[in-house]
Image (cartoon, grey):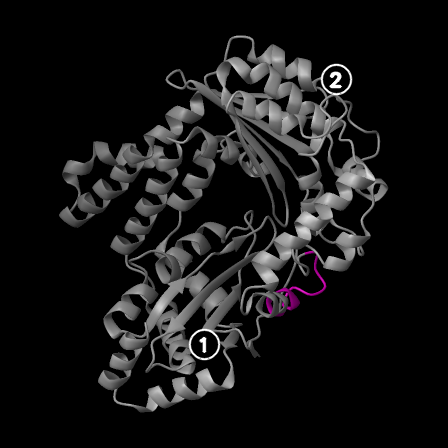
Amino acid sequence: MRQSIVLILLLIGTTTPGWFSAALAAETSLMTMAKPLYEVEQQIEYLQLENGLQLRLLPQNSASSVTIASEFAVGSRDENPGQTGYAHLFEHMLFKGSENAPGDSYAQTMSQFSGRFNASTFFEFTNYYATVPSYALKLALWLEADRFMAPQLSDATVTNQQHTVLEEMATTIDNQPYVRQAMEFLLAQAKGSPYGHAVIGSAEDIQAATPQSLLEFHQRYYRPDNMQLSLVGSLPAQTLDWVNGAFAHWQQPEKPLPKRDTHYTFEAKSVSGEIIDSRGPWPALLLAWHTVGQQHQDAAAITLLENYLLQNRSSLVRQRGLSQNEFLLSYSIPLSMQYMGVSNLVLVPRAAVSLDLLADNVDRLIADVAANGVDAAALRQLKQNWLINALQKLDDPATLAKQLSATAALDKLTPLTGPWERIYAVTPEQLQAAAQQYFQQGTVTLKLLPPWYIRWGKTLMEWLPSSLAESIEEWAL
């Protein structure tokens, strides 16, 4: 619809004012840039097997390998009380033997033909991906199907992977300053929802897992009607026959999938806290905001607003930090779930800058956007940046395959262009309204504090002349 309007207006462009022609040219330029998304999408073959498995095939004649990406709609949000961490633990188990490929056969076979493989678990999904030479596709599909349908879990393999996950928990969470306490503080803000516990789960629940309880988890969620499978790359003519041979006999269980809640309301109230970690090397500030899920009407505006405020090198926070010399480091990794979203920002201050000053300055930036909005030129640049990132993914078959297998229900037949058209449709008014509704109120503020002697020294430097404080900081760094 939007494309048709642009094309019609182009025909009468010679009779429009100069400013309108310039704006129209910019809009048309974006749609011209987006053409590869439409062209690639037209090459995708969409199929659904009788057992409910969704399949997407995207041939790339210039490739010599194929990426197989499988995603199951199961994550930590689907875990029952006492079984936190099961989705992630079971992901590990699927690399440790199946009915016809016991033990480490999967990894050994993949390595024989230099296959690359991995997996990940999140709040709402678990995905598996492997890139193999085209000649090995039939075998790779058979291996994938065998482990998804008939995993073999013994006491020894479960114990082994429990230790692996607990080591991962220690390395990435417990042995890192601030991480465990900050994670628990943030998860507490989602208390009462399925998002209120960590993806990796609790050590107690992981240690209590048994082969039987994990197989019951598998039977609930690892089923063809809960799976998306995508193949991208050099696809032999027999590819569809091989997919059917591997997966078509997988029967859909009679028992329906457990229903997911689809709506959560979080009170927009400001929450403040602080944590002290004796291992902390320097103070930091963590800010977070409840936003919306991927299928919400405001999701596209939130995505662009996160980029504008927090993420890109040209973001307001980065511009402010570089020009005012206020922080050493900033980073933002938004969490975008199907029915919930969290925007966040971590700032590490300069020696002479307090955490309170950083928080106040971020508040002022948000208040300015909420009051004055974003001009049309800046919004077009945000859309263009999003589009460039989307176009870059077309050049990486592995990334593209994973993206196709993560297709939301509303984009079932438009996995590439559906998200773009929602981004393209965002208006300055929607961006301003999103700033007012989701960022101007309900800020979660957490101060990450090191031991007393570092805090004392930091406070002292905040009182020193800025030039002296910066000299001490430079010497220390």
Residue at 50 percent across and 30 percent down: it is 401
User: Is residue 192 found inside the magenta-colored segment of the image?
Assistant: yes
The quarter in which the C terminus is drawn is bottom left
The quarter in which the N terminus is drawn is top left
The crowd level at tag 1 (other Cα within 10 Å; few <14, some 14-19, many 20+) is many
Q: Is residue 157 above or below residue 261?
A: above
State the residue lying farthest toward the top.
237
Secondary structure at numbered mark 1: loop
Checking the image for residue 249, the label placed there is 2
Span shown in magenta: 185-194
Checking the image for residue 283, the label placed there is 1
Image position, residue 123 (x, y; %): 63, 50
Instruction: Note whether residue 258 is visible.
Output: no
Residue at 77 percent across and 55 percent down: it is 205
Left of 215 or right of it: where is 40?
left
Instruction: Note whether residue 165 is visible.
Output: yes
Q: Amino acid at mark 2?
A: His
Which sits in the foreground, 121 or 382?
121
Of the image marks 2 and 1, the number of the one nearer the N terminus: 2
Q: Nearer the viewer, mark 2 or mark 1?
A: 1
Left of 80 or right of it: where is 375?
left
Q: Are the residues tagged 2 and 1 within 8 Å (C-beta)? A: no
Q: Amino acid at mark 1?
A: Pro
Q: Is residue 346 above or below residue 31?
A: below
User: Is residue 141 found inside the magenta-colored segment of the image?
Assistant: no
Q: Main secondary structure of the magenta part?
A: loop
Number of labels in the image equals 2
Q: CA distance from mark 2 to mark 1?
A: 57 Å
Image position, residue 300 (x, y; %): 45, 50
Which sits in the foreground, 235 or 289?
235
